[in-house]
Image (spheres, grey):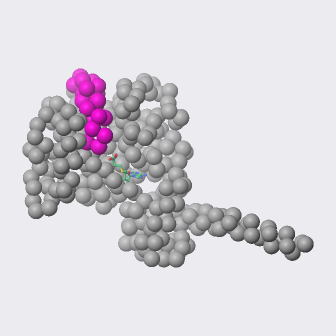
């Protein structure tokens, strides 16, 4: 009877043990990555992190997370692929066009009153969001007095952002987005086509500063009138999200504007009382204290 209980117990625990083992392996992997390379993924939201890690286990052709850990720690190129796969660089120009339209209507009038404008795009990925802002400011006659800081933890994405070179196949969707975002010209004015790519007009890059910056580990580096951080914090747990909101709060000037992604919100963060909505639906907030 005892043995049977033991066996039954054993069976029940097998599943739990598996989950515990997975948890231990993930913690060891992330701790190793943090200690060796300085990248801190320990406070990313677990469900999507787990999915990405397993996806990477399969794409590196290794049997389990411990084997991935070994490869990531011993092979820098594997680590770089790992960062790229955790970074989820999905983006597009004028993504969520209604946000850009609302920004034109509600934030641009505020920006007109400033002698100069500093904007930070945190988690800018391959740059599409940043160039969308450059186009918008150009059309509103504000680009010359603006400095746009575009940062990401992912070096590979930043490199592409700096080049401003995109797949020609995406232009149809981007043109549609641009029009829906209140664009006032022909979108094709902003690029030249070359084979299967388009090169954005170099003047759009003139006032953009691209730099590596990790929201989990780096500090504030300037004061901004506007901060965009869209579709980045959805991958963080509550602790890291609060930490990053602290960083933004500290980096925004008085009455500065914070723009979040469609599925994000300032509510349920430690800073919810420090902002009032300029547009609740589009997730545009204004710092009030
Ligand atoms: C889904 S993209 C969002 C791009 C753009 N903001 C948009 O909404 O279209 C998320 C970006 O956040 C970046 N990211 C993730 N964790 C980060 C961190 N700790 N610090 C800086 N950037 C981070 C990723 O590298 C990726 O480029």
Q: Going by the image, does 104 lie left or right of 42?
A: left
x, y percent for residue 193 = 10, 55
Task: Quadrant for the N terminus, please.
Answer: bottom right
Q: Is residue 262 above or below residue 38?
A: above
Q: What residue is rendered at 61% in x and 63% in y?
A: 23
Please provide the residue range marked out in magenta: 94-114
Q: What residue is rendered at 54% in x and 44% in y?
A: 238
Quadrant assignment, res 287: top left
Q: Is residue 151 above or below residue 23?
A: above
x, y percent for residue 242 = 51, 41
Q: How many numbered discs?
A: 0
Between residues 93 and 205, which one lies in front from this camera angle? 93
In the orientation shown, which residue stands out farthest toward the right?
A: 1
Quadrant assignment, res 177: top left
Q: Going by the image, does 97 lie left or right of 35?
A: left
Q: What residue is rendered at 69% in x and 64% in y?
A: 16
Q: What residue is rendered at 46% in x and 72% in y?
A: 58
x, y percent for residue 38 = 46, 60
Between residues 26 and 198, which one lies in front from this camera angle? 198
For residue 62: magenta? Answer: no
Q: Is residue 118 visible to the viewer in this orientation of the structure?
A: no
Q: Main secondary structure of the magenta part?
A: helix
Task: Quadrant for the C terminus, please.
Answer: top left
For residue 111: magenta? Answer: yes
Between residues 164 and 252, which one lies in front from this camera angle? 164
x, y percent for residue 231 = 39, 46
Quadrant assignment, res 24: bottom right
Q: Is residue 110 visible to the viewer in this orientation of the structure?
A: yes
């Amino acid at each position: 009877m005892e043995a049977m209980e033991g066996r039954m117990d054993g069976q029940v625990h097998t599943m739990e043990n598996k989950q515990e083992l997975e948890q231990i392996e993930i913690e060891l992997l992330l701790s190793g990555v943090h200690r060796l390379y300085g990248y801190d993924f320990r406070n990313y939201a677990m469900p999507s992190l787990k999915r990405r890690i397993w996806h990477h286990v399969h794409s590196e052709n290794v049997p389990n997370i411990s084997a991935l850990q070994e490869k990531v720690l011993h092979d820098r190129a594997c680590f770089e692929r790992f960062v790229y796969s955790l970074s989820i660089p999905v983006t597009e120009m004028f993504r969520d066009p209604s946000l850009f339209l609302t920004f034109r209507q509600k934030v641009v009038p505020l920006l007109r009153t400033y002698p100069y404008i500093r904007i930070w795009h945190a988690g800018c990925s391959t740059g599409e969001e940043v160039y969308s802002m450059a186009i918008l400011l150009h059309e509103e006659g504000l680009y010359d007095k603006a400095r746009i800081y575009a940062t990401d933890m992912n070096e590979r994405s930043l490199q592409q952002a700096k080049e401003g070179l995109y797949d020609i196949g995406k232009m149809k969707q981007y043109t549609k987005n641009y029009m829906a975002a209140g664009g006032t010209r022909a979108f094709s004015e902003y690029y030249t086509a070359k084979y299967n790519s388009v090169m954005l007009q170099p003047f759009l890059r003139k006032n953009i500063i691209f730099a590596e910056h990790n929201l989990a580990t780096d500090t504030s580096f300037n004061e901004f009138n506007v901060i965009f951080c869209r579709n980045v914090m959805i991958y963080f747990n509550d602790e890291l999200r609060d930490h990053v909101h602290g960083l933004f709060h500290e980096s925004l000037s008085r009455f500065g504007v914070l723009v979040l992604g469609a599925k994000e919100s300032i509510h349920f963060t430690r800073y919810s009382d420090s902002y009032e909505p300029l547009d609740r639906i589009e997730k545009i907030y204004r710092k009030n204290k």
